[in-house]
Image (spheres, rainbow, N blue to C red):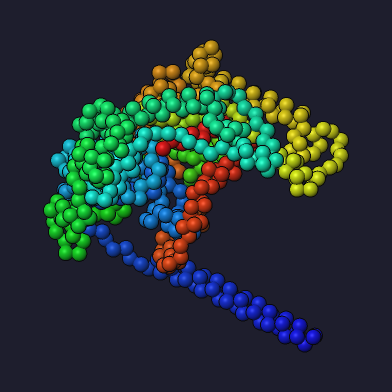
Amino acid sequence: MKGLFRSIFAVFRFLGKALSVVRHTLLNLLLIVFVIILVSSFFTTTKELTIRENSALMLSITGDIVEEKQLTDPINELLSESIGIKDLPRETLLQDILDAIHAASTDARIKCLVLNLENMGKAGIDQLQVIGKELEVFKKSGKKVIAAEDFFTQKKYYLATYADTIILNPMGAVDLHGFGVYSLYFKDILDKFHVKYHVFRVGQFKSAVEPIIGNAMSPEAKSQNQQWLTSLWQSFSADICKHRSLPADAIDDYINTLSKKLAETGGDTALLAKNRGLVDEVKTRGELREYLTQMTAADATTDFRQASFRDYLKTINPSYEGVAKSPNKIGIIVAEGTILNGDQPAGAIGGDSLAALIRNARTDNQVKAVVLRIDSGGGSVFASEVIRQELLALKKSGKPYVISMGTVAASGGYWIAAEADEIWASATTITGSIGIFGAIPTFEDTLDNLGIHHDGTGTSPLAAGLNLTQPLPPLLAETIQLSVERGYRQFLSIIESGRKIAPSALDAIAEGRVFDGKKAQELGLVDKLGTMQDAIIAAARIAGVSDYSAQYLHKPLSIKNKLLQQFSLKIIAVLKPSHLSLEPLGRLYRFLAPLQQALQFNDPKGIYAHCMVEYD
């Protein structure tokens, strides 16, 4: 018997050693590959790009449209592609899109522009409108804009309506359905697991915590959401009707009579879109290639002459980057994402990291004013206040700061905006949400139900601190509620002093209410409607400078991050799997994305000014 056990153990020892050898061999091979890529990149010469005459600029917008791109991470890029984003990058910089269109409008080599929106991700209406305005300038040069897709989703179609010609695949459709806000509600499942959520909030319209305390949207939340959704939809559909020369009620009629009109075309969605004036042509992919070939000089290998968006960007100088042309600078600082404590990378707003950028602008003698570009639903109250204090120090130094609101500038995003010299927004910006909340789960009943119990003793009712395995002490609950109420009063005082709104008037616009930019301007929460360029001009005017250059102020990259950014795409080319499918993991990732955002919250008091509104 002992001999048998020795033989079994010997087999396992051999397998263990073999696996160890394989593991170390693979790791060493990966290290060697990385070193080869790293070294070879220093000796690789970049082939000069040539844009040929009569080329079509293929404006491929891939991934989410953002104000500031996150640092490229090869592993994340690899996973992103596996979960459904087919092309890199997973983000497209808004300013890159505008720069490419602007340059192409005066580039004699570019004959037309083709919108490729197949892989476009999230985009705010305000962003699409700014792109659309640049496309209209492009068309004034006498060059055509073509939008061609197999299937137009709602936001893709909106941007496509700025084109001269819209082409749809015979098997395609135009999906227009309106705007809505729909959420998952977790009260029942939390009750089933005996989880107690202790919620502290001020404002009956502060709906961020509703998914954990109820099973449906409250009447207050429904009412306010309906108001701003209606306003945005009216603007959205009116723009489409204007661009396509359709009757004012054409889009609502298309949606409301969809089944009836589709029956008249025998279920042909592409024919329906053409009959209703939504598209100009219905063409197969082959017919589309022939059409584009006629638009440009023929090419034996690619059917038509084209310049890719990424390649074209390499031939132009990006706006607001590089060496400033004037000693007077208007600094542009991007605040995009959830507001969190500490030092955060691009894609989130770090209280410390954003404050450091503002401080650098204050001490830089060349910077005469700052434009803070906000696209954020808020987050940590503590981090928001850290940022606000640094902005006040900037203002006290004699340098004005102007806010340019993007898609969303609500709750904590409005906390840091309220005391600016001027606030600019788009008509479709989501703002307001002036309210505070805290939410703490405790699991004492969950553990009791599992037969796990917790007990002990201490010198005071608060000796255990915030122990999630015990009931929340009433004394601690009272202190949290008092802190939330104080935070709300502080929020109101910031708005009162910054926006010069009387306390009596604040009651009607606070308590978590959300507004579109147009309504916010009427209420005095926003000064003017316009673009970031308008905000830059305003900042220069307030600073009293006429000769100036606007320039982005970025967080400096570490040496490691610079190397990572430089070589990530080359690493992907080597490591990219040819047959590995992570689509099931991708579906799970997309489903849990809201939870991932909530887990980022790190306010030391657990108190947040955050608006979780997201419409589709």
* Residue at image point 39% right, 49% down: 63
In the image, 250 versus 208, the foreground residue is 250
The x and y percentages for residue 390 are: 54, 32
The x and y percentages for residue 244 are: 22, 34
Q: How many labels does the image show?
A: 0
* Residue at image point 31% right, 53% down: 310
- The answer to whether any part of residue 180 appears in the image is yes
In the image, 283 versus 492, the foreground residue is 283
Position above or below: 532 against 15: above
Q: Quadrant of the N terminus?
A: bottom right
The x and y percentages for residue 556 are: 48, 47
- The answer to whether any part of residue 99 appears in the image is no
Outermost residue, bottom direction? 3
In the image, 525 versus 580, the foreground residue is 580
* Residue at image point 79% right, 48% down: 451
Q: In which quarter of the image is the C terminus?
A: top left
Side of 379 where 456 appears, left or right = right
The x and y percentages for residue 266 are: 24, 44
Q: Quadrant of residue 189?
A: top right
Q: In which quarter of the image is residue 424?
A: top left
Side of 266 where 192 appears, left or right = right
Q: Quadrant of residue 466?
A: top right
Position above or below: 224 against 59: above
* Residue at image point 65% right, 29% down: 200
